[in-house]
Amino acid sequence: MEKVLVIGASGQIGSELTMSLRNVYGNENVFATDIKQPPQDVLESGPFQILDAMNDKELIHYVIRHKISQVYHLAAVLSGNAEKIPLQAWEINMKSLLIILDLAKETSLKRLFWPSSIAVFGHSTPKNNTPQLTVTEPNTVYGISKLAGERWCEYYFNKYKVDVRSIRYPGLISYKTEAGGGTTDYAVEIYYEAIKNKNYECFLKEDATLPMMFMPDAIEATIKLMECESSKIKIRSSYNLASISFSPAEIATEIKRHIRDFKITYKPDFRQQIAESWPQSIDDSAAQADWGWKYKYGLSEMTKIMLEEIRKKFRN
Ligand code: SER
């Protein structure tokens, strides 16, 4: 039986991934850790421990004690926040990855997942249908750390046969746990503000189109990649992954179909420059070919679910 560890289980991806993994592997076999308290369901459905991903000794003890066979390492400082604390963000994002890669090499860990991002691309990358293999000259701390991380993942696979797998996530949209400090997070905030105040002041320009994805698709992709037979995984840096692309104006139009008097205004801040350096749409044909990836949710289905679920949250 697999014993799975999720590092960063209280975060936007981790909180949902932990619950999905518990459905697959059984509650008691999915161990959740983070430096902050997780949502109630993660806490109550299975093992959780406060554990700092930077604490290599504690982490290795934990992995050995619980006979962990798979790790999902999700702890990171996102793009907007990283710009405010560049060296600290670099230290956190890189050191925690190197700790876990080395742990995988030294222990009997079977598989490791680590998330990369569309942030590995930069101004010199083709903006539309961005290929898997292309120019990568990121100019954010977050993007630089993700690109370096990809190189380290491939290195550990080639040199030490560490079975590490990775996805370049687009902006992820979810209602369960709010993200913190990302450039794409406007597309989560906008739903909350639409319900609370019927208006939203957007920190990106109206035409800032970015690749996005609804969380259930991202979770499905992640588990699918991790369950795939090792020989099919041809890319050991990180896979491009795509579903929907939209601009703030387009998501606002979609919200107006449900909340007629919803209003959006624009006050771009430093995150607009970050958005301008990222692609608008992604070519994920390698993920489709290698492990059969296909997305399900479009902008209108996602909007309907987001609004319904956030309304429910407020009612409770
Ligand atoms: N959603 C992330 C961010 O905006 C990108 O990976 O930072």
Image (tube, rainbow, N blue to C red):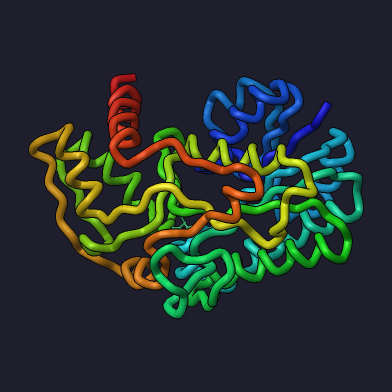
Query: Which residue is pictured at 54% across the width and 34% down the height?
Result: 16
> Picture coordinates of residue 76 (x, y %)?
58, 55
Query: Which residue is pictured at 40% across the width and 72% down the height?
Result: 277
Q: In which quadrant will I find the C terminus?
A: top left
| Residue situated in front as seen by the camera: 73 or 253 | 253
Instruction: Work out whether residue 88 can be spotted.
Output: no
Query: Which residue is pictured at 80% across the width and 30% down the height?
Result: 2
Q: From what the image shows, is residue 131 above or below residue 230?
A: below
| Residue situated in front as seen by the camera: 170 or 62 | 170
> Picture coordinates of residue 1 (x, y %)?
83, 26
Quarter of the image for residue 18 reads top right
Query: Which residue is pictured at 72% across the width and 41% down the height?
Result: 228
> Picture coordinates of residue 314 (x, y %)?
30, 26
Tally of numbered discs: 0
Q: Is residue 213 left or right of residue 190?
A: right
> Picture coordinates of residue 301 (x, y %)?
32, 33
Instruction: Work out whether residue 185 can be spotted.
Output: yes
Quarter of the image for residue 99 reads bottom right
User: Which residue appears farthest toward the left when viewing the image?
Assistant: 261
Q: From what the image shows, is residue 39 above or below residue 146?
A: above
User: Which residue appears farthest toward the front when viewing the image?
Assistant: 289
| Residue situated in front as seen by the camera: 103 or 85 | 103
Q: Is residue 3 left or right of residue 143?
A: right
